[in-house]
């Protein structure tokens, strides 16, 4: 948090590269000093085995989409959301891309599952794309959310940490992220 505050005031950062709506800076110190396992690891561990434990059988035809509302929406209303809200253009464009990809395979979207922390907000979004079924909007427990999202044939990510980790657990397989 201190590095972010310094970057906002001084327009440079000590340790972190920032690329947000209102701030773009490059770190000045961290490129010079690399400490710790993650900065020096020469081999990255695959998350695929963990992903298979979470969702052992992929669900053919299922498109899972994560829509973030809740606290991010509140920050947006207060003008404090640095990352912005994803809109119908992003979600609709993603669904159209998936529909077209499946049509090239001679298939169609079987189910659209919208996973969210804010069903009321998600219900206000326009997910109407020709050839894509009406969304089933769900607020599920974490374990079930991960299982459904990791096991879906396609996943559309929001701009959230949970979506990031879902994409990582899927190893990027048929995932769309902002």
Image (cartoon, rainbow, N blue to C red):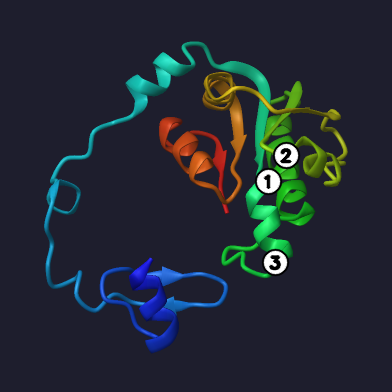
- Depth check, mark 2 against mark 3: the one in front is 3
Image quadrant holding the N terminus, namely: bottom left
Compute the Cα span from label 2 to label 1.
5 Å
- The residue positioned 53% from the left and 41% from the top of the image is 163
How far is mark 3 from mark 1, CA to CA?
Answer: 13 Å
**Element class at badge 2:** loop
Answer few, some or many: residues within 10 Å of disc 1's Cα (few below 14, many 20 plus, some between 14 and 19).
some
Above or below for 155 versus 86:
above
Vertical order, 100 against 139 (above or below)? below
In the rendered image, residue 173, in percent from the top left (x then y), is placed at 48, 33
Would you identify the image quadrant in which residue 77 lies? Answer: bottom right
Question: Which residue is nearer to you in this view: 62 or 79?
Answer: 79
Q: CA distance from mark 2 to mark 3?
A: 17 Å
Asked whether disc 2 touches disc 1, contact meaning CB atoms under 8 Å apart, the reply is yes
> Which residue in the structure is indicated by mark 3?
78
For residue 114, which quarter of the picture? top right
Residue at image position (79%, 52%) is: 88
Name the mark on residue 118.
2
Q: Which residue is mark 1?
A: 70
Q: Earlier in the sequence, mark 2 or mark 3?
A: 3
């Amino acid at each position: 948090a201190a590095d972010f505050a310094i970057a906002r005031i001084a327009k440079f950062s000590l340790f972190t590269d920032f690329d947000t709506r209102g701030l773009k800076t490059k770190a000045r110190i961290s490129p010079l000093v690399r400490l710790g396992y993650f900065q020096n690891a020469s081999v990255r561990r695959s998350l695929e085995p963990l992903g298979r434990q979470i969702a052992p059988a992929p669900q053919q035809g299922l498109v899972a989409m994560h829509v973030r509302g809740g606290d991010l929406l509140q920050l947006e209303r207060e003008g404090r959301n640095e990352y912005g809200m994803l809109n119908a253009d992003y979600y609709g464009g993603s669904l159209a891309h998936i529909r077209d990809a499946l049509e090239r395979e001679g298939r169609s979207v079987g189910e659209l599952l919208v996973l969210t922390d804010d069903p009321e907000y998600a219900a206000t979004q326009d997910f109407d794309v020709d050839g894509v079924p009406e969304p089933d909007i769900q607020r599920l427990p974490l374990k079930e959310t991960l299982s459904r999202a990791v096991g879906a044939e396609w996943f559309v990510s929001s701009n959230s940490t949970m979506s990031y980790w879902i994409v990582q657990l899927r190893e990027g397989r048929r995932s769309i992220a902002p």
